[in-house]
Amino acid sequence: MVSNEISIRIQYSHTDKMGFCYHGNYPSFYEMGRTELMRDLGMSYRELEEKGILMPVISLNIKYLHSAYYDDEIIVRTTLKELPGARITFYCEIFNRQNELINTAEAVLAFLNSETMNACRPPQFFLDILRKHFA
């Protein structure tokens, strides 16, 4: 298992008229977490794309437990619990500064060959990097 945490401050533009963080912003928070987790592991989405691998989101299951508000600082924890096959699942948890769990999500991404747009296995270098953290 491997995970990371990032901190995000809720901006005014993230909120709705009621002052709540608008529900549609959460997927971008998950993407920030995934991007930084991969960067922490020593790779990037850009690197995968340059090697001909795309990773579209194919499902996103979100549970809204509590609200975040304007100017709140939230912590986004992103976790990989298993090595990927043709799909990879990122588990996301969002906490407020009181360490209260306010949101959870599971984002499933597929690996696609950018030339054929067909599903493929993750590249070997990607698996080699991940295996170091699952040994």
Image: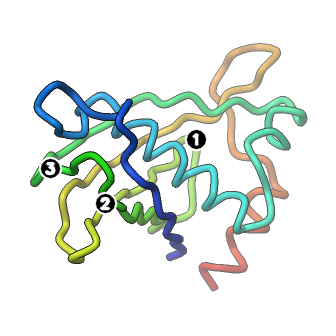
Q: Label 2 belongs to which residue? A: 94
Using the rendered view, name the quadrant where residue 56 is placed: top right
Earlier in the chain: of badge 3 and badge 2, it is 3
Kindly identify the residue that appears in the image at 76 percent across and 33 percent down: 53
Q: Position of residue 77 (x, y in %)?
A: 42, 66
- Horizontal and vertical percent position of residue 6: 51, 64
Instruction: Tell me which residue sits at (54%, 74%) in the image.
Output: 2
In the image, 61: left or right of 111? Answer: left
Q: Whole-percent x and y of residue 82?
A: 49, 66
- The amino acid type found where label 3 is placed reads Ser
Q: Dot 1: few (<14), some (14–19), or many (≥20) neighbours within 10 Å?
A: few
29 with respect to 103 (left or right): right
Q: CA distance from mark 3 to mark 2?
A: 10 Å
Which residue is under mark 1?
86
Pick out the residue farthest to the bottom.
135
Q: Is residue 55 above or below residue 2?
A: above
Mark 3 or 1: the one toward you: 3
Return the residue at label 3. 67
